[in-house]
Image (cartoon, grey):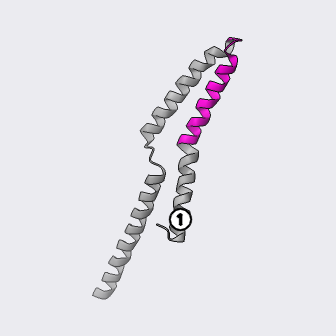
Amino acid sequence: MASHGARAQHQVESDSSTRNRESAAFGAAFPVVPGHALLGAQCTATSMIGGGFILEDPIFNGLAVSLIFGILVSTVLTLLVIPVLYYAYLRRTEARGFC
C-alpha cells in the first residue's frame, strides 16, 4: 500500500514539475502582463485618435496614414505576433531536446 502511495506522490510531483516548466516557458514567451497590454493598447488608441485629426489636412494626410498604421502594426507585432513566434520556437527546441 505504501508503494502505491509513493508512486502516486511521484506522479503528482512529476505532473507539477511538467506544468511548472510549461508555465515558465509560457511566461518567457508571453512576458506581457494583462495590465501592461491594456496600457499599451490605450497608448496606441490615443495616438491613433490623435493622428486621425491630421487626416483632414491635405499636406499631412500621408504622414497621418503612415503614423496610424505604423502604430497599429507595431502594437500587433509587439503584443501578439512576436510572443507567439517565440513560444512556438521554445516549444520546437524543447521538443528536439535543445533546452
Most foreground residue, 33 or 77: 77
| Horizontal and vertical percent position of residue 55 | 67, 16
Judge from the rendering whether residue 78 lies leftward or rightward of residue 15; answer left or right. right
Q: Is residue 67 above or below residue 14?
A: above
Total labels drawn: 1
Q: Was residue 64 drawn as part of the magenta stretch in this picture?
A: yes
Judge from the rendering whether residue 96 lies leftward or rightward of residue 9; answer left or right. right
Q: Was residue 30 drawn as part of the magenta stretch in this picture?
A: no
> What residue lies at 38% left-to-right and 73% top-to-bottom?
14
Judge from the rendering whether residue 40 lies leftward or rightward of residue 54; answer left or right. left
- Image-quadrant location for residue 33: top left
Judge from the rendering whether residue 52 lies leftward or rightward of residue 32; answer left or right. right
Q: Which residues are magenta?
A: 57-78
> What residue lies at 50% left-to-right and 71% top-to-bottom?
97
Most foreground residue, 4 or 28: 28
- Image-quadrant location for residue 63: top right
Q: Amino acid at mark 1?
A: Thr
- The dominant secondary structure in magenta is helix
Q: Residue 38, can we see it?
A: yes
Query: Could you say whether the residue bearing mark 1 is in a helix, strand or loop?
Result: helix
Pick out the residue farthest to the left. Answer: 2
Q: Residue 1, can we see it?
A: no
Which image quarter is the N terminus in?
bottom left
| Badge 1 density bin: few <14, some 14–19, many ≥20, Cα 10 Å | few
Most foreground residue, 44 or 58: 58
> What residue lies at 41% left-to-right and 63% top-to-bottom?
21
- Image-quadrant location for residue 7: bottom left
| Horizontal and vertical percent position of residue 29 | 48, 52
Q: Which residue is mark 1?
A: 93
Q: Is residue 2 above or below residue 77?
A: below
| Horizontal and vertical percent position of residue 3 | 31, 87
